[in-house]
Amino acid sequence: AYVSATQRESDMESWRQQYLGLETVPASLTNAEIDYFFAPSEQAWPFVLRRRSPLSRLGLIIHIGFLRMTGRPLSSVDRIPAPVLDCAARYADMVPPQIATLRAIYKRRPTLFDHQKTAATAVGLKPYGDQAIRHVTGFLRKQCGSVISRDELVRDVRLWLYDHGYMLPGLRPMEKLAAAAQLFALNQLKASI
């Protein structure tokens, strides 16, 4: 199986893998995990400070934290647990709002998209596109020599994309890539027989 750069750097970081690819903020996050993901890093802080209103800073902090945690952009309709709002509000220098989702923050849809794009830049993630697909396809073809399980291949895709600075797509595109790599490996095996 693929050993990510995160795993190589520190065994302690392996706990983060469980969050890669999630589509919502888990309500079960510990305070330490919330602080780890949602406290703006030195790299992200200048992006947060460029926002004029505390509510805008709050939204961006949550987007940055979610991207750091999952590698995916956060939808405005996903529920935000109160402890995450409390943490983000502390850094946005405001009283925690009584909202369930970020939809209450975004009166204009372009602001949501701007925050998602800015969060990706702040975290250092590039959009998932043709270049990422080409590179991860080559990686998967090599992985199929030692990994048979599609679930393991999908996990390896998540780790590889995140380690190489790409935002994660949804589950279906990653499953398609894993299935195509398995078919490629099977055809290679048939051809060698």
Image (spheres, rainbow, N blue to C red):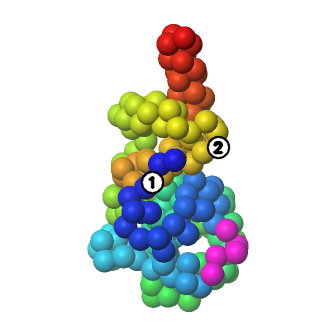
Q: At x 59% / y 85%, what residue is drawn?
A: 31
- The tag on residue 189 is none
- The x, y position of residue 100, in whole percent, is 69, 71
Where does label 2 land, which residue?
151
Answer whether labels 1 and 2 touch (C-beta < 8 Å): no
Q: At x 36% / y 76%, what residue is drawn?
A: 41
Under mark 2, the amino acid is Asp
Which quadrant holds the C terminus? top right
* Residue 8 against residue 126 in the figure, above or below: below
Q: Is residue 18 visible?
A: yes
Where does label 1 land, which residue?
3
- The x, y position of residue 51, in whole percent, is 37, 72
Q: Provide the major secondary structure of the magenta segment.
A: loop
* Residue 37 against residue 168 in the figure, above or below: below
Closest to the observer: 79 or 19? 19
Neighbor class of circle 1 (other Cα within 10 Å; few <14, some 14-19, many 20+) is few
Segment tinted magenta in the rendering: 26-30
SS of the residue under disc 1? loop
Q: Is residue 115 visible?
A: no
